[in-house]
Image: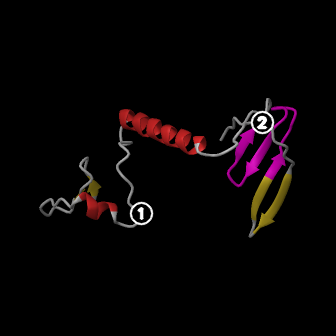
Amino acid sequence: MLVDRECGIKQTTGKPTQSVASSTVSSLPGWLPPSGGTTADGEQAAVARAERELSELLAGLPGRHYGDVAIRLFQTVLDGVLFGLVDETDDEFGESVELYPDELGFVPPWDGEYDT
């Protein structure tokens, strides 16, 4: 099924197309409004809306401020899967830590930027 721009559902099974009222569509479990993220332009619009929503949510947090945080390395294996923040410093690449199991790599200046 596809969601059209008017927030209706259209069947794509070869049967005649049916539109469903948007109130019915929005009551479906797991339904989200169309993001417009199916094209490069649509993706940019979806990201812009998400950033606005995030800014609004953060603005609603009382006493919010940014600062340094302290962390420490750790690792554990659960059901054969490594979880942790692991020091992977070596001579070839220098200082680095890796967050497992997501394999997010962090390097100086330790500013929150990461590599996948």
Q: Is residue 79 above or below residue 103?
A: below
Local packing at callout 1 (Cα closer than 10 Å; few below 14, some 14-19, many 20+) is: few
Query: Residue extending furthest bottom?
Result: 79
Badge 2: residue crowd in 10 Å (few <14, some 14–19, many ≥20): few
Q: Position of residue 29 (x, y in %)?
A: 39, 67
Quadrant occupied by the C terminus: top right
Amino acid type, label 1: Gly
Please say if the residues under marks 1 and 2 sit with CB atoms less than 8 Å apart. Answer: no
* Label 1 element class: loop
Q: Is residue 66 left or right of residue 15?
A: right
Sequence-first tag of 1 and 2: 1
Q: Assign the N terminus to one quadrant of the image.
A: bottom left
Q: Is residue 29 left or right of residue 62?
A: left
Q: Residue at x 84, y 34 (%)?
A: 95
| Residue drawn at (86%, 37%) of the image | 90
Any magenta on residue 21?
Answer: no
Q: Which mark is residue 67?
A: 2
User: Label 2 sits on what residue type?
Assistant: Gly
Circle number at residue 30: 1
**The quarter of the displayed image where residue 88 is located:** top right
Instruction: State the extent of the magenta-drawn residues as a range.
Output: 85-107
Residue 32 in the image: x percent, y percent? 39, 55
106 vs 24, nearest the viewer: 24
Q: CA distance from mark 1 to mark 2?
A: 36 Å
